[in-house]
Image (cartoon, rainbow, N blue to C red):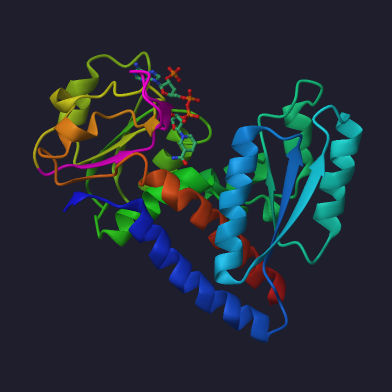
Amino acid sequence: MGLLSGKEVAEALKAQMAKDVEALKAKGVTPTLGIIRMGEEPNDISYEKGATKTCEGVGAAVKVFAIPREASQDELLKVIKQVNEDKAIHGVLLFRPLPKQINDNVARAALLPGKDMDGITDGSMAGIYSDSGAGFPPCTAESVIKILDHYKVDVAGKNVVVLGRSTVIGKPVSMLLLKKNGTVTVCHSKTKDLPKKTQEADIVVVAMGRAWSVDKSYFKAGQYVIDVGVNAKPNGEKGTCGDVKTEEVEPIVAGITPVPGGVGSVTSANLVCHVIEAAKVASV
Ligand code: NAP
């Protein structure tokens, strides 16, 4: 299988989304994403462009709520209340990190879990751990599952090792893998002998944010590797790289996602999937 292209997964998701949007529009519903952005942070602008392109490509709509970076917490809360109450907006993406005058917990708590498209509210997180179906998982964490599903990598009964335990990736992806009946081991910076742990796995998800830190000594034949890392190249070259040394690992394992062109390519498509799912719920 070699390289597991995230672009291919995103294209398949988009093809399905275009059909879903058509069906929703026939019922008079246009799935609409509300984006709340404070200021003009380059990362936010770049993600907004990608999400807008994906939405427009499948026939969904985007409404951007841009407020100055120096706006007060009350001003932000007013916008969040507005999108919560707007029935024509099915899902919301709130760009973080927020500026320092905003209490992140207060902002997250203000957003309705049903409108939270990127699993940032406590309600969405509870939904992942309780299997209640409330809210949506973080887009990137769920993209890992969508990639495994697309390439028909069965998780049930497999040993899965996750490197990283952040709230946005490591923990939620571990819960999603557990839900798929994987036997999941979560590793972190205090874990001893990481290569021994990963060598015992069938599937390895790497989300440490450490450029090219995971080499071929971590892997064996037949494994599937999902590299979530997106890092500046440590050698000073332009562009991004993953946590894994893809070039030396790819010939050994059964499949590995590249960076760029892997998990990151699926993330914004998955965001729009969530908007369409929320629109379906609203249209019933
Ligand atoms: P994070 O919050 O910094 O968490 C990193 C995790 O890795 C922590 O749990 C940390 O352990 C663990 N870790 C760090 N160094 C380690 C080491 N040497 N050995 C074992 N574990 C180690 O990062 P994050 O937000 O989860 O992001 C991880 C990566 O994913 C980053 O490169 C980020 O840019 C990328 N990312 C990609 C996408 C995408 O769309 N593809 C989206 C979001 C993020 P401790 O808990 O013990 O500190």
Depth check: 210 or 47 in front? 47
Residue 105 position by quadrant: top right
Depth check: 228 or 193 in front? 228
User: What residue is shown at x 76% (from left), y 34% (from top)?
Assistant: 39
Determine the residue located farthest toward the bottom in the rendered image.
Answer: 26
How many badges with numbers are in the image?
A: 0
In the displayed structure image, the side of residue 149 where residue 176 appears, left or right: right
Placement of 68 over or under 118, stated as above or below: above
Residue 151 position by quadrant: bottom left
Depth check: 280 or 102 in front? 102
Q: Where residue 221 appears, x then y in whole percent?
A: 8, 39
Q: Residue 21: within the magenta?
A: no
Q: Where residue 20 appears, x then y in whole percent?
A: 55, 76
Instruction: Judge whether residue 180 can be spotted in this image.
Output: no
User: What residue is shown at x 49% (from left), y 28% (from top)?
Assistant: 166
Q: Quadrant of ligand 1?
A: top left
Q: Main secondary structure of the magenta part?
A: loop
Placement of 25 over or under 100, stated as above or below: below
In the displayed structure image, the side of residue 168 where residue 164 appears, left or right: left
Instruction: Judge whether residue 193 can be spotted in this image.
Output: yes
Placement of 93 over or under 73, stated as above or below: below
Residue 119 position by quadrant: top right
Segment colored magenta: 222-239
Q: Where residue 136 appears, x then y in whole percent?
A: 58, 52
In the displayed structure image, the side of residue 108 where residue 45 appears, left or right: left
User: What residue is shown at x 83% (from left), y 34% (from top)?
Assistant: 68
Q: Quadrant of the C terminus?
A: bottom right
User: What residue is shown at x 87% (from left), y 31% (from top)?
Assistant: 71
